[in-house]
Amino acid sequence: MPPCPANLLPWEESLRNIPDAQADASLTIIEKLIKNIVSDPTNDKFKRIKLSNPKIHSCITSVDPALEALLLMGWELLDEDTLFLPDDLMMNVSDFPGRIMAAKAYFAKKGAPRAAAGTSPVHQGGTAGPSAPSASTPTTTSCGTKSSVASKSAFQFQNRSAKEAAEKNVANSLADLRRQKAAEYTNKAQEQADANSFGNYFNFGGSTSSSSPTPQSATVSNANPAYQQNMPMGGGSSSSSRASTGRYRGSNVELREMSEPLLSPDRSGGGDPTVGADPHVRPSHNFQKQVEREATEKAAAQDDLRSLQKAKYKQYKNDPALQQRALQNQNRLQGSSSSSQPSNDDGGSWWNPFSGGGGSGGSGGGPPPSGGANRPRMKTVKDLPKPVRRG
C-alpha cells in the first residue's frame, strides 16, 4: 500500500488501515449521516443519534470502524446510547461530502487491480513467482493501527483540553464578577459612612448618632480659629443651652427630622398628627385619604340620622299624647291655609309683575286696578321689543 498523504484527516487514515470491505461499509454509513445533516442543518434528530435504535445499531455499532471514524471526525458520545455532533463541527460539515467522495474513489481505484488479479494464474491454482508474497506473510503499512490510535487519543485529548479551558474561563468570569460585586458593596458602604460622618460633622455638642462617632467640640474649635475667637470664654450660656436642648441649626437631629414626613405624629400626642408639629410648615395633603375619610364621616352621619328617626318614630308610636298633638297641629295648619285669602293694596287681588296677569281681579295683561295708590304701571317682560331676525 502506498504511504498515507500528509493532508489526510485522522478518520481517513483509520479507514485506510482496515480492510476495504469494512471501509466501504463505514463510508456508506458516514455518507448517509452527513447527507442528512447537510440537507437539514436545523433538524436536531440528525445531530443526535440514538445507538439503541435497531436500524442504527445494525449499521453503526455492528461496524466498529464506522463508530471509530465518527468519533475521529468529531462526534461525541454523550452517554452509552447517544452520539452527538457538536456545534463547532457544524461549521465545517459542508467539507465532509467532498472528502467522503474522494475516499470512495480511492477505495474503488484500489479495488480495481485486485479484481483483475483475481483472474491471474496465481489465484487459479498456478505457481506464484518468487516476488509474490505468501498469504501467511504479514504486510506492513506506513500508516498502521498505532498511528490511528495515536491520532484518536490526540483528538480526544484536544477535546478534553478545550473543555477544561472553557470551564476554567467560566470559573474566572464568575470570580471576576464576585470581586466586582464585592467592590461595589464596599464602595456603597464607604459612601454611606461618609454621608453619616458629614451629617455628624455639624453636631458640635448635641445628641450623637449611634451609628458613627461625632467629633468633639474642642476638635472643631481648634480646626476653626475664627469660630474659637467668637466663642465666649469658659463656655457661656449659649453653648450650655445648646448642649442642654440638643437641637440647634445644622445638627444631625435636624437633618434627620427633615428627611421624615411632615407633621409626623408625636408619640406623646396620642397619635394626633398636629401635636408636636411645626405650625409654619404646610403638610403634604393626601387626597385619597381625605375622600375616604369624608365618605366614612358621611356614612356615619346618615347612620346616626336613621337611628334618631327610628327612635323618634318608636317614641311617637308608643305615646298617645304625641299622636294627639300631631293631629291637632295638622288640623290647625289645614284650616289656616283654607281660610286665608290673598290681599294687597291694589283692590284685594294679587298681581304678578312679571307676567302682568292677576287672580280674581280680572283678565291678565293689564295694570293692577286703581283702587290702591296712584302709582305708575310697572313694565314687564312683554314690554320688551320683539327680536329682529337677521340673515
Image: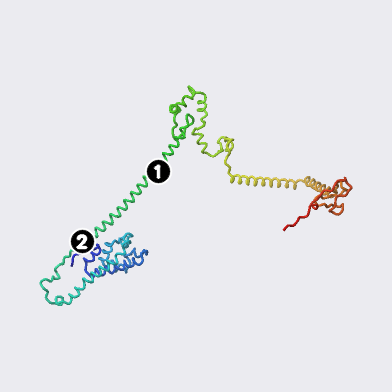
Q: Could you tell me the amino acid type at mark 2?
A: Ser
The total of numbered circles placed on residues is: 2
Q: In 3D space, how far apart are the residues under numbered discs 2 and 1 (Cα atoms)?
A: 55 Å
Instruction: Please identify the residue farthest to the top as the structure is shown.
Output: 234
Residue 312 vs residue 180: left or right? right
Q: Position of residue 169 (x, y in %)?
A: 32, 51
Label 2–label 1 contact, CB within 8 A: no
The part of the image, by quadrant, that contains residue 151 is bottom left
Q: Which mark is residue 147?
A: 2
Crowdedness of circle 1 by 10 Å Cα count: few (<14), some, many (20+)?
few
Q: Quadrant of residue 130?
A: bottom left
Disc 1 element = helix
* Lateral position of residue 240 relative to residue 189, left or right: right
Q: Is residue 156 depicted above or below 238 in this figure?
A: below
Q: Is residue 233 above or below residue 70?
A: above
Give percent across and percent down for residue 383. Answer: 80, 52
User: Going by the image, does 67 lie left or right of 288?
Assistant: left
- Residue identified by numbered label 1: 184
Q: Which of the 4 image quarters holds residue 115?
A: bottom left
- Between 30 and 8, the one lying in front of the other is 8
Q: Position of residue 340 (x, y in %)?
A: 85, 48
The C terminus sits in image quarter: bottom right
| Helix, strand or loop at mark 2 | helix
Residue 71 on image: x %, y %: 28, 62
In the image, farthest residue toward the left:
130
Which image quarter is the N terminus in?
Answer: bottom left
Between 357 and 32, the one lying in front of the other is 357
Q: From what the image shows, is residue 283 above or below residue 78?
A: above
| Rendered residue at 18%/66% (across/down) | 2
Nearer-N-terminus badge (2/1): 2
Q: The disc labelled 1 sits on which kind of residue?
A: Glu
